[in-house]
Amino acid sequence: MGKIWRISGPLVIADDMKGSQVYEIVEIGDEGLVGEIIGLEGNKAIIQAHEDTLGLKTGEVVRGTGRILSAELGPGLVGSIYDGLQKSLLTLAENTGSFIKRGAKALALSRDKKWQFTPKVKVGDAVSEGDIIGTVPETNLIEHRIMVPVGTKGIVKEIRTGDYTVEEPIARVEHDGEVKELTLMQEWPVRKPRPYKQRLDPSGLLTTGMRILDYMFPLALGGKASIPGGFGTGKTVALQQLARWAQTHLNIYVGCGERGNEMADVLYSFRKLKEPNTGRLLQEKEIFIANTSNMPVVAREASIFVGITMAEYFRDMGYDVLLVADSTSRWAEAMREMGGRLEEMPGEEGFPSYLGSRLSSFYERAGMVECLGSPERKGSVTVAGAVSPPGADFSEPVTQNTIRIIDALYALDVSLANKRHFPAISWLTSYSLYVDAVKDWWEKVDPGWDNTRATALRILQQEAELEEIVRLVGPEALPEDDKLLLLTARMIREDFLQQSAYHEVDTYCVPAKAGLMLKTIIKFYELAQDMLSSGAGIEEVRSSPIVYRISRMKEIPNDTFEQKAKELWSEMEKGLVARKGGIS
Amino acid sequence: MNISSLYVKEGRAINKAKGALIIAESIPGIKFNEIVDVQLSSGEIKTGQAIDISEEATIIQVFGGVSEVDLIGSKVRCKGETLKLPVSIDILGRIFNGMGEPIDGAPLIIPEDYLDINGRPINPASRQPPAEFIETGISAIDGLNALVRGQKLPIFSGSGLPHNRIAAQIIRQAIVKGKEEKFALVFGAIGISYDDASFFIRNLERTGALEKTVAFINTASDPVIERISTPRLALTAAAYLAWKQDMHVLVVLTDMTNYCEALRELSSMREEIPSRRGYPGYMYTDLATMYERAGRIFGKEGSVTIMPILTMPDDDITHPIPDLTGYITEGQIVLSRTLERKGIYPPIDVFLSLSRMMKEGIGPGKTREDHNNVFMQSYAAYSEGCYLREISTIIGAEALGERDKIYLANADEFEKKFISQGEFEKRKVEDTLDIAWRLFSALPEEDLKLISEKFIKRYLPKYSRKT
């Protein structure tokens, strides 16, 4: 047991700490604040406090716990709300009221709740790390697969069936005469990536229901994406939409240093919204981590790693998991603050020089893998992190270091947001390197996908070029076919890319509908081009009722869309006709 | 602060005094971040804060600098307490300074409790999503950037813009409703001029709201350190009134730019590594710990709504102060110098302004069923008009097509009829929406794509007049 020697903000130095190890968790002071040793020097331990140190005194006790920062993994995770250190916030609210008291404890998993365990192995079977020994129906959407912990193997001596808490033994495994008891719960140190058999390339579309993502800049399962944007550009809404509708088995939402009211909104809406395919409540496939901006700074780093560790655990069961983190900039700021207190040599803008490597150590834990153990299975972790660049200036260190690691960039544009074009993802600066990884997937859903996509992007690029001319000579001075191009680009922007997160139908657009919508606009463009070349004027095209009909496509429900689109196409072919004997 | 009578510890040996820092020998029992007294040889007392304590030394930041501190006769006295605010329901109607001491000539209050001015974070799982519309009577806010209870919505202004008048109008119209009994206003003045502070106090007096107000005033001539405690005192008072007394509290803090300047000043005196433009790297977290005290809580009647006012240095919205604020608050009301020059009051820039909580607070049963549609269509039409205005400055309005001319004219009308209103004019939200509908009449009907057809039939003047 040591005692406090120095306090400077979240930095605490304790004396008489011989025998401690780096990254060991300690309890600081009379209130028992959680801290983590980040360095040792003789008898002194350098500790980062995960809770507010206001009012601490020198001489107060510091207790080592002998364990390093770990996450509890087992049934009960899904649907839970945790703080950055995996304390259950609902338990805290029950025990200490609506305000968070520092030093208050709350375990991640309930020790009383019984779970129904069904074994998948028999006595006498040989098992090793990662093998699935049984299942627990955790929610209606998630079957929790109980795995042999990493580092354990042997012959099953006993396996039980029935209702157990997470601490009661459900199996005994013998290896070299040593018997180990297995429980439903295991622990894993959060800073260490969980092992797998083999890393695979990201493949297959992570369907998000957002047209600009799915169709234009697809995200693959096991991929990593970043969403940078100034304030008010809709980062949070975009991430919430991802966490809501992404067609994965499980989503983890990490609110890291962000707004409390928005977190409340997320929690509240997920208790009401239904998963589109199964009709079950979204919270049955969701884990929340809420470390809002007024909660302790240092715990922001922990919150990100706790989140990714839980994601890997479910990946290891053979699931596709999406983790969204809002916002990684706040985490980087926490690193900067700690670095300053430790008097480290600062890098760019005061951030520590290891900013890039820390960011990579998080993003690189995304990926598709072949999981350890039997039966053979594949799982994936996809990561999407928001970045909040100061002054919406993407040249700042956090954005730049992030862009170097990720493979899909969704750049949010302030001027689009000011025009209330949402999602304000810029089609000119965003990119996805997963286009090839999802090509096969798209070809089955929407043949000719890459062609349609390329055509649309080309039209938008041409619009940007024409826009420069329009600013000089005015829209009326352009030739007719350029005016048509502008009209089409506008339709792509407003009637396809713009999508309302709050419209009951438009909030989630199935890929097939997205494909058909864009094809309709391109078809319109082709027919209108014929009209123009046969001598019709642009006004004739613009005033066609078809234009209005196309603008209302978004509101047509997913299931009836194909039928409605067919009707629209036949009307289009009748309505937009080239004049007979025109100049061709 | 009046628990200062019991000094518990005293440190005599000061080893170093430089800039704003004193390094004294370790003082047993001193708490991290506590406020201490530094007594000079002359007997004069300065205030300081323990910013780094260890068994070897205590580092004290002295507010107002270390002038006249000597290493022999000066001493440090500490109370073993962090800053606390004495509270009771009697704080209503009172005016305090930036240390929580009354400055209105009335006696001290009899405290029911002493509250730590830093508060404790609200458990995110206990927060109730804000959803109650606050009618401010200002069209540009109610119609396009609605404020809801529990929100934190700042006003981003510039020097010389009428932010004080707008804030006063909001206070007058939104809060003094009469039927709403359990409301309170907490006013925090941070480093503003005496004139500005008395403008607010007079305004409150005139409307009879002063008795439901708690004011904390730190004027430009008061100590800089008190700028750090003033907003925290105000928010602590607000938290007490909202969560203990079940009141709906609106907190107006002006001018937060002065707060941030004070933070920078103190940080550089502490020789901390600066972040952008010399502001400390923790400014985001520091502001967030205050603004996040806004909200609603399940099972509690009251609410805390925060409206900070800040002046953007050089009207630059990317300056660290408005920038970090915008990342914390749920939107912003931005004032525009261009509109101000056109003589439009309130000069609210509706493109840069935003209320993130708006969608929860509007709609049937709260404002009116067509509100969201009207809001979207108004933006689209005004945005198109402004774009055309920009083009027409180069190519001339004559070169525009007929349809474009309609939109151009509509943008001017929108500014004159919708955004502009009297300083003492209180518009009901229905009136605001009806003004928007009258403006829509000038547009081609098939262009109203963002409004559902049933609302067009119900509210567009040419149909609604018939019924």
Image (cartoon, coloured by chain):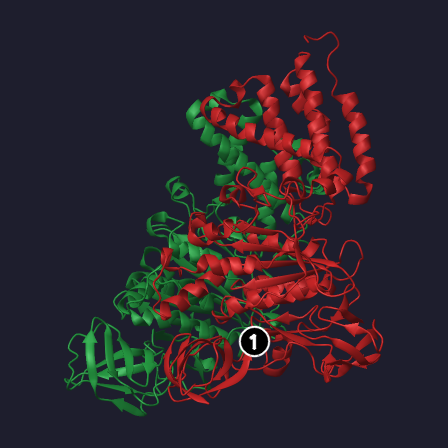
Residue A144 placement (x, y as % from top left): 76, 69
Residue toward you, A429 or B263: A429
Q: Chain of mark 1?
A: B
In this picture, residue B119 sits left or right of residue A488:
left
Residue toward you, A208 or A563: A208
SS at badge 1? loop
- Residue beneath the point at 64% across and 34% down: A492
Residue toward you, B417 or A323: A323
- Residue B449 showing in the rendered view: no
| Residue A304 against residue A535 in the figure, above or below | below
- Residue beneath the point at 72% across and 45% down: A509
Residue A480 placement (x, y as % from top left): 59, 17
Residue toward you, B268 or B35: B268
Amino acid type of disc 1?
Answer: Asp
Pick the quarter of the image with the C terminus of chain A: top right
Chain painted green: B
* Residue for badge 1: B246
Corner quadrant of residue A57:
bottom left
- Residue beneath the point at 48% across and 64% down: B306
| Residue B291 against residue A565 in the figure, above or below | below
In this picture, residue B232 sits left or right of residue A218:
left
Residue A452 placement (x, y as % from top left): 68, 32
In this picture, residue A55 sits left or right of residue B448:
left
Residue found farthest to the front? A176
Which shade of the palette goes to chain A?
Answer: red
Residue A25 placement (x, y as % from top left): 52, 79
**Exactly how many numbered labels are in the figure?**
1
- Residue beneath the point at 70% across and 24% down: A544
